[in-house]
Amino acid sequence: MIFANLFFIYLFLPLNLIFYFVTKNKTFRNIVLVVFSLFFYAWGEPVMIWVLLGSVLLDYALALLVERCHGTWGAKAALIASVVANLGVLGIFKYSGFLVENLNAVLHTAIPVPQIALPIGISFYTFQMLSYMVDVYRGEVAAQKNPIKFLMYVSMYHQLVAGPIVRYSDIAEEIDNRRITATEVSRGISRFIVGLAKKVIIANAAGVFVGQYLNGDLSNLSVAGAWFGILMYTLQIYFDFSGYSDMAIGLGRLFGFHYLENFNYPYIATSVTDFWRRWHMSLSSFFRDYVYIPLGGNRRHQFFNIFVVWFLTGLWHGASWNFILWGLYFGVLLVIEKLVMLKLLQKIPKFFSWLYLMFIVVIGWALFYFTDISRLGQFIGLLFGVGANGLFDTALGITLSSNFVWIIIAMVSALPVVPWVRKFLYDRLYEDSPVYTAISSVQVVANVVMLGICTMLLVGQSFNPFLYYRF
């Protein structure tokens, strides 16, 4: 099941809210969240729910053991067991086929390649449970004694299958004590609808162009066509993933949870360093706190640590060499920035720093998109005129002219225009002023309009997945 789905919006979510708010009993509400979350996860692939439940049960028990044996070898052994088990399960489901394929290629063997379906969200909930186990081991959080509450923490459908990666410490207090106000519910609804609009109105439309320009015979592309295709993917992946994060954060607020932000307008960044402080922040902070800093961080072997983190970041995204190349690509660029580029970027006008960053990011998305290395090489060549079918083509001109308004809206939506305008107005208005009230009313109307447009666009759509579900 996905959020951008009429069944979810008009049946599943309303039923969940009705059952949740029918009583104020905390235990009942927790059980309702667990039941609906497991149903959400099992929808479409019920067998894989046993992988999730098995991992939850194991880490629940091991966390209690870590806390009971704190400061002894028993605690360390329990932590190691959790890390090995979680990464082992992730490795079997996600990387076993990739490993066998490469062994066959190197050793010229014919070992059968495992064909194992990947449980949705396994990369996210594995990291979520690892962060919990490490935090319990460090004494930063207390182990959750109630198995229902721990299952609720891991399985909440708002963030289960595609993040953000929610650390136990961020919502530990809200697991036991949640305050739900009308204001928070209103904000949650608005945030969900904004995310839905990002996904349905922008990401899905951009995805159509991506399919047209990047999935066919690349030799037919002009240079401009190649750039248009990858720019559309640049928009698609941002609005798809940030839209999902917005919906997850909005849903969390409806039930009293405040998840941390996962995106902060990354396409206004002026360096690679700045970009990765704004993009998929929950993943970046995970690798920083649980890999980079324990390896030595900035204190020792900094560049080695960066390469380890970015190798793992690439590998986390998928069992394919293009993802590893993508991760190392950014690792190299981050090292170069730390050595020389950051000082230069601070001296030149921000517009040129932004152009540098966007060029780097767009090339990076090409590495990310093409899992076939030969097609990747061909496409990179096309971007610079090698093997391209001319500089420009008539069909692209028609596409640009007929979709000009949508393209402008999509590009502007990637900028923090709304926060800028809201801050400008609210800093100059009193809450009881007529203009302030009018602005709030406009937001309600905008939500209704966006929801109506999304509903119309979703009618009849049968294939509407989030890109990050495959990770």
Image (cartoon, helix red, strand yellow):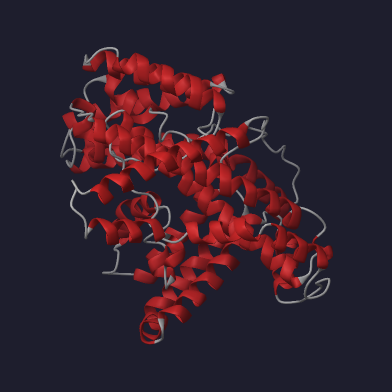
For the C terminus, which image quadrant? top right
Q: Which residue lies furthest to the front in this view?
A: 434
Q: In which quarter of the image is the N terminus?
A: top right
Using the image as rendered, state which of residue 462 and residue 98 is in the foreground: 462
187 over 146 or under it: above or below: below
The number of numbered discs placed on residues in the rendered structure image is 0
Q: Nearer the viewer, residue 119 or 404?
A: 404
- 115, above or below 420, in the image: above
In the displayed structure, 211 sits above or below 303; it is above
Is residue 55 or residue 448 the one in the foreground? 448
Q: Nearer the viewer, residue 449 or 338?
A: 449
x and y percent of residue 306 in the render?
Answer: 40, 65
Q: In which quarter of the image is residue 129?
A: top left
- Which residue lies at the image location 71% right of the left edge and 76% below the top edge? 384
Seen at 30% across and 32% down, the residue is 185
Left or right: 355 as drawn, with respect to 133: right
x and y percentages locating residue 358 in the rendered image: 52, 70
Residue 126 shows up from this direction: no
| Residue occupying image coordinates x 50% and y 61% | 412
Residue 51 horizontal side relative to residue 228, left or right? left
Q: Which residue is drawn at 73% across and 72% down?
A: 381
Q: Quadrant of residue 228?
A: bottom right
Q: Position of residue 141 (x, y in %)?
A: 19, 38
**Relative to residue 110, is residue 14 drawn left or right?**
left
x, y percentage for residue 334? Answer: 43, 71
Residue 238 in view of the camera: yes
From this view, report whether residue 439 is shown above or below residue 36. below
